Image: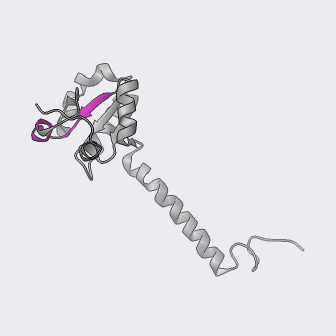
Amino acid sequence: MELSLFQGHFIFGRLENLLFLITAIISGLMLLWPMVVRGGIKEIDTREAVQLINYQDAVVLDVRDDSEFTDGHLPNAKHVPSEKVEERWAELERFKEKPIVVIYRGGVHSNKPSLFLKKQGFTHVVNLIGGIDSWKRAGLPMVKR
């Protein structure tokens, strides 16, 4: 007796199996979707950010607007507002080989600055999950200008 994928008693023959297969495919695509949307920019949590800053001399790039930066930022953060990264990226060029931790506002943000830096040859650009809000919630150090 020969088995076929299309016989009534194998994978596609039973409705339950077909629904299971469709669910598995959709679940896999949902897991991959954030990576596609982010354009390949890795997101890290506050613990990973602290490790990069302390042990790999990462540069913190705060891309929030001026008033948000003045209200509080990470110690030693470089400030280049999101809309000015493309015109001011040369200021960061000496950090191309270092990890860059990009800080946004909390919540939804645009990856445009991170993607732009990646295109300019920055080798290790990451975004902080939850932005400055997650840093504050973790009780990590902040400074005001």
Give the left or right position of residue 34, taking residue 14 as reference.
left
- Single out the residue that lies furthest toward the right: 1
Residue drawn at point x = 68 percent, y = 74 percent: 12
Residue drawn at point x = 63 percent, y = 75 percent: 18
Instruction: State the scheme by which the image is colored.
Output: one colour
Q: Is residue 71 at least partly visible in the picture?
A: yes
- Single out the residue that lies furthest toward the top: 94
Q: Is residue 99 at least partly visible in the picture?
A: no
Q: Quadrant of residue 122?
A: top left
Please say if 33 is above or below 59: below
Residue 111 forms part of the magenta stretch: no
Q: Quadrant of residue 121?
A: top left
Residue drawn at point x = 70 percent, y = 72 percent: 11
Count of picture labels: 0
Give the left or right position of residue 4, taking residue 89 as reference.
right
Image location of residue 80, percent across then percent down = 19, 32
Image location of residue 16, percent across then percent down = 63, 78
Q: Quadrant of residue 56?
A: top left
Question: Magenta part of the protein: which range?
Answer: 59-70
Residue drawn at point x = 42 percent, y = 43 percent: 40
Check the picture and name the quadrant holding the N terminus: bottom right
140 or 115: which is nearer to us? 140
Give the left or right position of residue 142, taking residue 50 as reference.
left
Check the picture and name the quadrant holding the C terminus: top left
Image location of residue 120, percent across then percent down = 33, 29
